[in-house]
């Protein structure tokens, strides 16, 4: 299959070009300043840890290619080379997007990795995800795409507040210091992020409608930088979106449980409660307390978000997790007003039903014994608690008036401690539920049968006002639509999904832009007065609620509506709110008039590839999708879904050593000399496991130390080669992965050397001098090159199995190493395959390939003219399969057909294997061949067989 690749100009490919004058190719007699490694004739061997250091004499010049050239084939020197090359080229291959955005004819590609929390130091998980995004971004630039690969900081959160308490620092100082350091770490990794990029001026390009932005705004757009969620220029727009949600009826307050420290008199986050249920600071037993909290009505979008999953074919595996989180959207909530002994209380109750079309047949509203009405500050609490008899269904003096139908039914406290899903209240409708029938009959409640079955088996409504005579399905749609129109519920959702509680009684978060007025109630801050900035305070342990409550001058303010005395909201927002829309802000990060330009967002969105940890596959993705659906309905963007393809990468795990007591030991406390690890002092046997890297488990690895030891490209290749992206990596540099990538870099070096030496021999390369056997050899290289291009391109674009891409490139380098000397000298096919190899390796190992390409570029009398020899390897177009190359049909390495497999077994390799073998297609294609191994990729629904011919 041919793979087309659009040509691209050098300045479109995203990294500064390396001047060729930087490199000088010197004869061997000029290399005397270096301590020599093994001679070039010595065959390469396995890396020896004792030989992983190369020492330069004190008067040696900076390390460049030929200063290490004579030590060909030495892994020891290659390792040092990788480090020296990376250091030399660091300024050239850093994250700079030059003028790609000015290339108006290019299609866009938006690659986004989840931005980090600035904790102070990068960990290996960061390095893995950003290496993947960097590799994909470089690949897409080489394919001629206009790429943004932005970066920023998810900077609000509890750790900064805890650091302020523990270290007597302001959270802002701690956060900004961490950002500064981590930015330097990212730069040292050679990552090509779009830190500073130029955006198109819509008035210049005409690619989207003109807006009313000022000239100052347009100039600001041309110098965009990373975003930081704790800065007012970002959270101003988080507050803006909150007010938009409030105006749409999607932000509201109600009582909810919080973790309460009775000693410190403050609210605790879940992370501040230990396994024994005690406060992390005071040690007191944490209590559950009801406080008024802010919620976002995510249930209003439940069905739309559930249905939209069908439009996301690239979310294999994650779609199921999203669907499970949302649940089956078969019912809705309806609102009721409550009375006690016939007296209106002003209290409201929302209850769920899976059969809203039968609402006229309701007999009661049921609540659990743990419902907030029995435990919070409701005026109904006393009446309900008096009626409660534990273990029994209890009729209460409270009645509920349906705000849609005006039907009044009693409130019942059921014996069950909880309902299914997340419900704590639901509507009892006996004609659709045998359980509700038993409750109604036991308590002597009256109800009506409102569903009748016709002779043909269809069901329709009776005794249901204007819905009488409708089919159940039509009545469901009509009744829920009417409830939504009247604002009394009706949003189709599941019984398990809760609205999003966003209140946090913390300081370091986005202030909720609301004012509480005794006369007007809650009033949003006018948009022109945003942002509501955080006040400067010195104590972050505020007793009685949020630390912000102690800032009296900030709290007390005039009501925006009546101008009377009022108080600001002192809760801050959950940090998930800040990260729920940041992908929009990246499209227009310096807009001072709105969160983002709709034109720019429409151009860049949706994100083409979103990369992050699988632990965020539910909550963060759900909240991000919620904000995107809302912005779509607000006419802010045309795309409803924010992400097209999703790559959820696995963890990096380190080895842990744990005592029977559960205590984790440092490696130096472990004796590894015996058959099993034991405590070095007590000789106790240890439990050895692989767990997510963590300081507390003493199994972390410092990325800077690893890069210092092995070099940037070696670490990049190890992370990409050790496992498929979605799988966990067990960090162990003694495994085959690290020696494998070291040997491969050495082979690349040897290949380039062999080619340069052949062409520098003085003999003019002439393809016509090749014998028929040599031409056949060259033809095989040409065919193999095309096969590898097709395979590697597919891995980069379809399944992102970069480990497989590296494996294929290793195969190509092995084939080139076996080429005969005359083919190396005279064959354009060898030259082309070698160049294609370096170009395809460049996104993954940009430093060493840049160095090698600079050497190839100086070779005289080249036979391939389709490469831009005056530009670096990262500025070359991605290799395309030659049009005349036709892949011969072969069951090996070729998609042969499709076999239907039930969803519930799609990730079970053995069952899929068996079903394929039993299928007609499998029997016909395999033809009784012996299968050596099968490889299942659940994410792409692809199974490969390795067969014995």
Image (cartoon, rainbow, N blue to C red):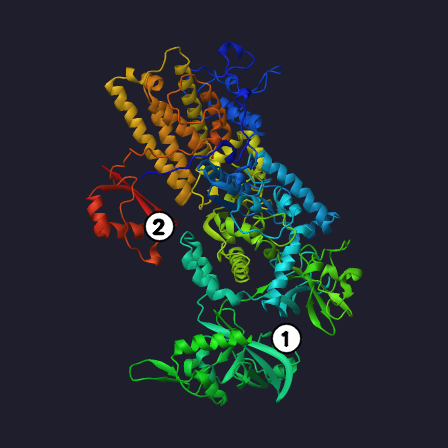
Q: Describe residue 405's horizontal placement relative to residue 347 as left or right.
A: left
- In which quadrant is the N terminus drawn? top left
Is mark 2 in CB contact (under 8 Å) with mark 1? no
- In which quadrant is the C terminus drawn? top left
Q: Describe residue 880's horizontal placement relative to residue 686 as left or right.
A: left
Is 200 in front, or is 454? 200
Residue 664 visible? The answer is no
Alpha carbon distance from label 2 to label 1: 50 Å
Q: Position of residue 418 (x, y in %)?
A: 52, 73
* 206 in relation to 852, above or below: below
Is 699 in front, or is 105? 105
Q: Describe residue 44's horizontal placement relative to residue 55 as left or right.
A: left
Q: Position of residue 195 (x, y in %)?
A: 59, 40
First reached walking from the N terminus: tag 2 or tag 1: 1
Q: Quadrant of residue 187?
A: top right
Furthest residue to the right?
553
The local crowd at label 1, few if under 14, some if 14 to 19, many if 20 or more residues have their Cα within 10 Å, is: some
Residue 415 visible? The answer is yes
Specify the label residue 933 is tagged with: none
Q: Position of residue 692 (x, y in %)?
A: 53, 46
Q: Residue at x 68, y 46 (%)?
A: 175
Disc 2 versus disc 1: nearer the observer? 2
- Please state the total of marks drawn on the protein image: 2
Specify the label residue 941 is tagged with: 2
Q: Position of residue 878 (x, y in %)?
A: 42, 34
Q: Residue at x 50, y 26 (%)?
A: 79
The local crowd at label 2, few if under 14, some if 14 to 19, many if 20 or more residues have their Cα within 10 Å, is: some
Dot 1 corresponds to which residue? 375
* 552 in relation to 405, above or below: above
* 476 in relation to 55, above or below: below
Q: Secondary structure at mark 2?
A: loop
């Amino acid at each position: 299959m041919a793979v087309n690749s659009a040509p691209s100009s050098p300045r479109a490919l995203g990294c500064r070009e390396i001047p060729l004058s930087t490199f000088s190719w010197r004869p061997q007699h000029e290399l005397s300043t270096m301590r020599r490694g093994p001679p070039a004739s010595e065959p390469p061997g396995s890396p020896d840890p004792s030989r992983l250091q190369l020492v330069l004499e004190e008067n040696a010049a900076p390390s460049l290619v030929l200063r290490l050239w004579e030590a060909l084939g030495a892994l020891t020197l290659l390792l040092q080379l990788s480090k020296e090359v990376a250091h030399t080229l660091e300024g050239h291959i850093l994250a700079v997007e030059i003028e790609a955005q000015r290339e108006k004819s290019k299609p866009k590609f938006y690659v986004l990795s989840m931005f980090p929390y600035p904790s102070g130091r990068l960990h290996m998980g960061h390095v893995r995800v950003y290496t993947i995004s960097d590799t994909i971004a470089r690949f897409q630039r080489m394919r001629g795409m206009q790429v943004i690969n932005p970066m920023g900081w998810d900077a609000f959160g509890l750790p900064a507040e805890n650091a302020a308490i523990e270290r007597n620092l302001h959270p802002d100082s701690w956060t900004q210091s961490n950002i500064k350091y981590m930015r330097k770490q990212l730069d040292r990794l050679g990552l090509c992020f779009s830190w500073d990029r130029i955006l198109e001026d819509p008035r210049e390009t005409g690619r989207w409608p003109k807006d009313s932005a000022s000239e100052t705004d347009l100039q600001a757009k041309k110098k965009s930088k990373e975003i930081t969620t704790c800065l007012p220029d970002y959270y101003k727009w988080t507050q803006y979106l909150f007010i938009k949600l409030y105006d749409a009826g999607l932000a509201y307050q109600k009582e909810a449980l919080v973790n309460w420290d009775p000693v410190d008199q403050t609210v605790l986050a879940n992370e501040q409660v230990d396994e024994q249920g005690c406060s992390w600071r005071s040690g007191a037993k944490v209590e559950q307390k009801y406080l008024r909290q802010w919620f976002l009505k995510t249930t209003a979008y439940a069905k739309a978000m559930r249905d939209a999953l069908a439009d996301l074919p690239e979310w294999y595996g994650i779609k199921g997790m999203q669907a499970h989180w949302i649940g089956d959207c078969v019912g809705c909530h309806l609102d009721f007003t409550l009375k006690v002994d016939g007296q209106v209380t002003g209290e409201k109750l929302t209850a769920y039903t899976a059969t809203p079309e039968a609402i006229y047949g309701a007999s009661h509203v049921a609540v659990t014994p743990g419902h907030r009405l029995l435990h919070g500050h409701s005026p109904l609490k006393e009446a309900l608690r008096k009626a409660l008899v534990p273990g029994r269904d209890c009729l209460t003096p409270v009645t509920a008036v349906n705000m849609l139908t005006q039907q009044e039914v009693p409130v019942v406290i059921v014996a069950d401690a909880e309902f299914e899903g997340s419900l704590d209240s639901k509507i009892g409708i006996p004609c659709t539920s045998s359980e509700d029938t038993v409750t109604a009959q036991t308590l002597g409640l009256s109800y009506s049968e409102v569903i009748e079955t016709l002779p043909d088996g269809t069901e329709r409504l009776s005794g249901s006002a204007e819905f009488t005579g409708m089919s159940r399905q039509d009545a469901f749609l009509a009744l829920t639509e009417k409830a939504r129109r009247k604002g009394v519920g009706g949003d189709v959702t599941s019984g398990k999904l809760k609205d999003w509680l966003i209140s946090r009684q913390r300081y370091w978060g986005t202030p909720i832009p609301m004012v509480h007025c005794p006369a007007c109630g809650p009033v949003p801050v006018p948009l022109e007065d945003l942002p509501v900035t955080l006040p400067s305070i010195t104590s972050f342990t505020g007793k009685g609620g949020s630390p912000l409550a102690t800032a009296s001058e900030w709290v007390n303010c005039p009501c925006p509506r009546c101008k009377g005395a009022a108080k600001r909201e002192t809760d801050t927002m959950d940090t998930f709110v800040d990260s729920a829309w940041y992908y929009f802000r990246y499209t227009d990060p310096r807009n001072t008039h709105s969160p983002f330009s709709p034109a720019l967002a429409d151009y860049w969105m949706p994100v083409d590839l979103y990369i992050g940890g699988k632990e965020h596959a539910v909550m963060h993705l759900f909240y991000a999708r919620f904000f995107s659906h809302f912005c779509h309905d607000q006419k802010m963007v045309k795309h409803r879904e924010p992400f097209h393809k999703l790559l959820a990468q696995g963890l990096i795990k380190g080895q842990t050593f744990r005592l029977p007591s559960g205590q984790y030991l440092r490696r130096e406390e472990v004796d590894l000399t015996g058959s099993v690890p034991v405590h070095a002092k007590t000789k106790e046997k240890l439990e050895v496991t692989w767990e997510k890297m963590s300081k507390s488990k003493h199994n972390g690895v410092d990325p800077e130390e690893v890069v210092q030891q092995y070099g940037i490209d070696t670490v990049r290749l190890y992370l990409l080669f050790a496992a498929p992206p979605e799988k966990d990596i067990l960090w162990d540099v003694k495994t085959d992965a690290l020696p494998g990538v070291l040997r491969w870099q050495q082979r690349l070096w040897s290949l380039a050397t062999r080619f340069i030496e052949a062409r520098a021999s003085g003999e003019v390369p002439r393809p016509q001098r090749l014998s028929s056997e040599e031409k056949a050899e060259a033809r095989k290289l040409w065919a193999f090159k095309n096969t590898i291009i097709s395979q590697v391109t597919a891995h980069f674009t379809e399944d992102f199995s970069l480990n497989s891409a590296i494996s294929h490139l290793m195969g190509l380098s092995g084939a080139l190493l076996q080429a005969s000397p005359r083919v190396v000298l005279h064959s354009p096919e060898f030259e082309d395959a070698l160049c294609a190899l370096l170009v395809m390796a460049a996104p993954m190992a940009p430093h060493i390939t840049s160095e090698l390409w600079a050497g190839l570029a100086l070779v005289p009398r080249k036979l391939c003219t389709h490469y831009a020899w005056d530009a670096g390897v990262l500025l070359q177009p991605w290799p395309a399969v030659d049009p005349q190359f036709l892949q011969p049909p072969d069951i090996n390495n070729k998609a042969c057909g499709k076999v239907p497999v039930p969803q519930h077994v799609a990730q079970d390799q053995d069952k899929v294997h068996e079903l394929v073998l039993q299928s007609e297609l499998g029997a016909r294609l395999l033809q009784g061949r012996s299968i050596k191994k099968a490889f299942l990729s659940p994410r792409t629904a692809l199974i490969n067989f390795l067969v014995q011919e």
